[in-house]
């Protein structure tokens, strides 16, 4: 169905020409899933976007053929390409925030594809759009169709993008990290649907992912990329069972798996007159850093036939988080995890309930008290594309908190920025670059560096590694653990990836429909889940088994 030969792509930057993809060969067969894996910046997404010539303005397709049916997409005119995009090839971009139109309702954006590429009328397209949103796994699709993208959670926006891609029934779907923002249960729904498309209608799937578990479970063929080149390719089972390239073996060793939990940090917790070790001190031995008491948050939804509706996004949520500890909030997209975090940080006002930070009630804090809370607590957003100012250089992004709170002078701030970039595995050379010149994973590492600049007491991590490949993911998790051991920083860690949660969390709270349905020490919850929903989350983890004998050997 798709045959790529000798594909080479470069980018024109202020510093010169950067070769992003070099001599890539790749095939996709009807009815099969081909997965492309590799580190952030390896050329995966560039390869995917080069197929339909949706490269940035500074991207140049230097050489190669991209044969789709009887067409070479590399040589088609723009009008000819428009007839292929959307109708015969569907694209699921990596980032839903910048890919969905913020001033159009979600249903209208799906209906637009149906009107352009099918025989749907304006009236029939609206009804069909709701059905497509349901197929993409969006709950309460009729209501969601009337909402704007900013009114949906990150995972819901991603499902809306998937609906746009599949609306016209394309022959080939290029899915660039289609499940990176989704919890495991919804991830399974989406991947099941893509797999059914492949099996029932012969749709070819090119799946770009950093999640080797997803690739292992879903792909018939695996392509491993590094530094713009294909270093290994073949049937997935063969590549995982007997990887030939050292880079492939490195990726397998870094893959998070429930079969091997990383050791959690032993953090030194300093109080006024004592110093305890977080992993050995009883959970309630010291006063908690954060205490949430009966938090409730309600939102008004668009009116329906029965009039306005109210959504209780957070429903009577209570928990405590100690100094030097990590509490993970897990659950489905829309379960209230991120909203709860925003209430803790006072980025949203609770409908009712209280938030105590270091013993002080900050539920209605303002002025100097709110500013002090901002300094002592930081947030790593889920979406690095939307959270970094595109006008700033990376250096300006990282030092912005230091400048805002008048910490140090220009020289010391720059030195701090270099140190932070080094700790998140980025070279100092990116200081002068802008976010648009970085990959998604690189942008997220910049966001993490910025959050750590003020050495806060609390860092709220909202899906902090969901955009990262497994090797950098492992580096960042190790970094977070080291910082916690060194400084006693506490993490409120929000993630849909339970394999990651097991590696870093001391305690876990499982949320569903705005409520905490189960909580407790991580070891107990993973070994003996009590609630049926928790068991469902654990069962849905892709690649939860050891990926391959080779990977197990390397990990051990």
Image (cartoon, rainbow, N blue to C red):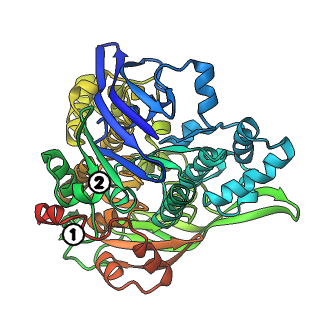
State the SS at label 1.
loop
Residue assigned mark 2: 235
Residue under the image location 23 percent in, 49 percent down: 471
Residue under the image location 52 percent in, 66 percent down: 332
The residue furthest front is 70
189 displayed left or right of 549: right
Which residue is more in the foreground, 384 or 373?
A: 384
Are discs 2 and 1 less than 8 Å apart at CB? no
431 displayed left or right of 130: left
194 displayed left or right of 252: right
Which residue is more in the foreground, 444 or 539?
A: 539
Which residue is more in the foreground, 37 or 361?
A: 37
Looking at the image, is mark 2 or mark 1 nearer the viewer? 2
Q: Which mark is drawn over residue 260?
A: 1
State the SS at label 2.
strand
Image quarter where the C terminus lies is bottom left
274 displayed left or right of 126: left
- Residue 201 locus on image (x, y percent): 57, 55
Q: Is residue 395 above or below residue 164?
A: above
What is the crowding at mark 2: few (fewer than 14 residues within 10 Å), some, or many (at least 20)?
A: few
- Residue 260 locus on image (x, y percent): 21, 69
Evaluate whether residue 488 shows in this view.
no
CA–CA distance between discs 2 and 1?
25 Å
């Amino acid at each position: 169905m798709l045959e790529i030969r000798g594909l080479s792509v470069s980018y024109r930057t202020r510093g010169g020409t950067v070769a992003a993809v070099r001599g890539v060969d790749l095939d996709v067969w009807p009815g099969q899933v081909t997965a492309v894996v590799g580190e952030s910046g390896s050329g995966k997404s560039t390869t995917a976007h080069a197929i339909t010539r949706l490269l940035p303005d500074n991207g140049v397709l230097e050489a190669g053929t991209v044969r789709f049916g009887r067409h070479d997409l590399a040589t088609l005119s723009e009008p000819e390409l428009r007839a292929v995009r959307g109708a015969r090839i569907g694209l699921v971009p990596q980032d839903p925030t910048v890919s969905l139109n913020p001033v159009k309702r979600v249903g209208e954006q799906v209906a637009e594809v149906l009107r352009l590429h099918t025989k749907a009328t304006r009236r029939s397209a609206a009804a069909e759009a709701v059905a497509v949103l349901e197929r993409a796994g969006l709950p309460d699709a009729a209501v969601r169709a009337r909402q704007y993208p900013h009114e949906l959670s990150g995972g819901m926006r991603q499902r809306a993008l998937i609906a746009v891609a599949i609306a016209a029934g394309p022959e080939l779907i290029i899915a660039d990290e289609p499940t990176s923002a989704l919890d495991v249960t919804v991830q399974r729904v989406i991947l099941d649907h893509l797999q059914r498309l492949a099996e029932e209608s012969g749709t070819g799937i090119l799946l770009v992912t950093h999640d080797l578990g997803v690739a292992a479970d879903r792909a018939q063929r695996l392509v491993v990329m590094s530094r713009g080149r294909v270093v290994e390719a073949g049937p997935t089972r063969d590549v995982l069972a007997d990887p030939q390239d050292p880079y492939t073996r490195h990726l397998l060793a870094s893959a998070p798996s429930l079969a091997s939990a990383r050791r959690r940090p032993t953090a030194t917790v300093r109080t006024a007159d004592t110093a305890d070790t977080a992993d050995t001190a009883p959970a309630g031995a010291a006063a908690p850093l954060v205490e949430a008491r009966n938090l409730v948050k309600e939102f008004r939804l668009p009116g329906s036939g029965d009039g306005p509706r109210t959504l209780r996004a957070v429903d009577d949520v209570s928990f405590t988080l100690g100094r030097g500890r990590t509490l993970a909030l897990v659950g489905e997209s829309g379960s209230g995890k991120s909203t709860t975090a925003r209430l803790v940080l006072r980025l949203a006002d609770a409908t009712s309930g209280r938030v105590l930070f270091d013993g002080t009630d900050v539920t209605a804090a303002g002025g100097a008290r709110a500013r002090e809370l901002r300094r002592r607590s930081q947030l790593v957003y889920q979406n690095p594309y939307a959270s970094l100012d595109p006008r700033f250089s990376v250096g300006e992004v990282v030092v912005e908190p230091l400048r805002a709170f008048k910490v140090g002078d220009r020289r010391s701030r720059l030195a701090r920025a270099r140190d932070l970039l080094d700790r998140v595995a980025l070279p100092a050379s990116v200081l002068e670059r802008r976010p648009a010149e970085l990959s998604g994973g690189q942008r997220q590492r910049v966001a993490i560096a910025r959050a750590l600049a003020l050495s806060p007491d609390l860092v709220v991590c909202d899906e902090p590694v969901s955009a990262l490949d497994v090797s950098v993911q492992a580096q960042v998790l190790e970094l977070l653990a080291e910082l916690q051991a060194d400084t006693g920083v506490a993490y409120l860690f929000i993630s849909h990836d339970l394999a990651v949660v097991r590696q870093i969390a001391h305690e876990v709270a499982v949320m569903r429909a705005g409520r905490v349905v189960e909580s407790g020490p991580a070891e107990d919850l993973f070994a003996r889940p009590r609630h049926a929903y928790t068991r469902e989350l654990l069962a849905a983890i892709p690649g939860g088994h050891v990926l391959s004998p080779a990977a197990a050997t390397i990990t051990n």
